Amino acid sequence: AHTYAPVALDLGGAHQAENMAVAVRIVEYIMRGQAAPIEALSSVGRLAGLRARQEWIVADPTRGASAAHPPMLVDVAHNPNGLAALLRSVTGLGEVFAPGLGTGSVHGVEERASGMPGVDVPNGLRGDVGSSVRPGSPVVVFGCMADKAAATMLRMVAAAGFSAFMVDLPSSRAMPVAELVQCAQTEGVHVVGAGPATQAYAWVRQLGEDVSAVLVTGGHEVCARWIPVNESYKESTRV
């Protein structure tokens, strides 16, 4: 194995550095033990990656209070391994995202009064749907497909101490939002709302500065809905 000068990798997550290291070793193997070309390493450092891979969406401060929202970290993690990598990265962000993530000592979220968005789910679900964000709780917007390991992922969300808004996705493959809410509550997630991505986005904006950042995850579909909603909102507030 060869050693190389440091390369700045413009991709989010420690797992991306691990992926690059594996790729370099594969190149060395193909080249029969020779070092990977420096030009190749430099080009990898310029990769920007795909949308919604630990992508930050931040408010434009030049547009004033009407365009304000908490920073949002959007990632398509759609299985337990992907979510585990994402949560490891989030934990490493420290005060930028949620200090003490998973310990119950997270700061940056104040107790909210009632008035969270309406929850369009059937009666009979356990009673904390539509309640306020827990003090000190990190926040996640979550939606996933019915064939994914939802219970396992939601168990991880609960263990990290998130308050969650469940997204109703308009796809025949998606887990119906009522089932998603019930699964989340069974796994111990504090569910604060449920509805379409537009409603979730409005809820996140309502949080304002009461939360340091919001995680949006669970799969490609929820991120594919979230990013256009954000772009549309940015256009509507353009001055």
Image (tube, rainbow, N blue to C red):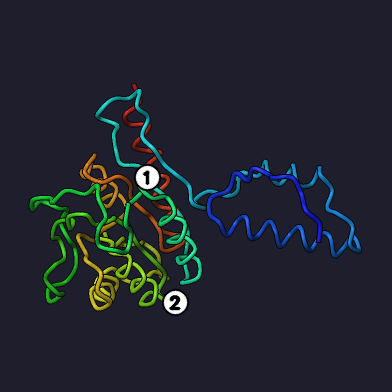
Give the foreground label among 1 and 2.
Answer: 1
Viewport quadrant of the C terminus: top left
Q: Residue at x 36, y 34 (%)?
A: 59
In the structure shown, which secondary structural element does the residue marked by tag 1 occupy? helix
Q: Nearest the camera: 38 or 167?
A: 38
Q: Residue at x 69, y 45 (%)?
A: 6
Residue 36: image location, x then y, percent: 83, 53
* Three-letter amino acid code of the residue under disc 1: Val
Q: Which mark is residue 96?
A: 1
Side (left or right) of 30 relative to 7: right
Q: Which mark is residue 116?
A: none
Bin the neighbour count of mark 2 within 10 Å (Cα to Cα): few under 14, some 14-19, many 20 and up: few
Side (left or right) of 20 relative to 140: right
Side (left or right) of 34 relative to 138: right
Q: Nearest the camera: 157 or 128?
A: 157
Viewport quadrant of the N terminus: bottom right
Identify the residue position indicated by label 2 in the image.
147
In the picture as drawn, the residue positioned furthest to the left comes out as 114
In the structure shown, which secondary structural element does the residue marked by tag 2 occupy? loop
Q: Residue at x 39, y 38 (%)?
A: 58
With respect to residue 62, does 183 lie above or below? Answer: below
With respect to residue 113, does 205 lie above or below? Answer: above
Q: Are marks 1 and 2 in contact (CB under 8 Å)?
A: no
Side (left or right) of 68 relative to 192: right
Residue 98: image location, x then y, percent: 32, 52
Q: Residue at x 55, y 56 (%)?
A: 14
* Three-letter amino acid code of the residue under disc 2: Asp
Bin the neighbour count of mark 1 within 10 Å (Cα to Cα): few under 14, some 14-19, many 20 and up: few
Indicate which disc, 1 or 2, sits on the residue closer to the N terminus: 1
Residue 187: image location, x then y, percent: 28, 76
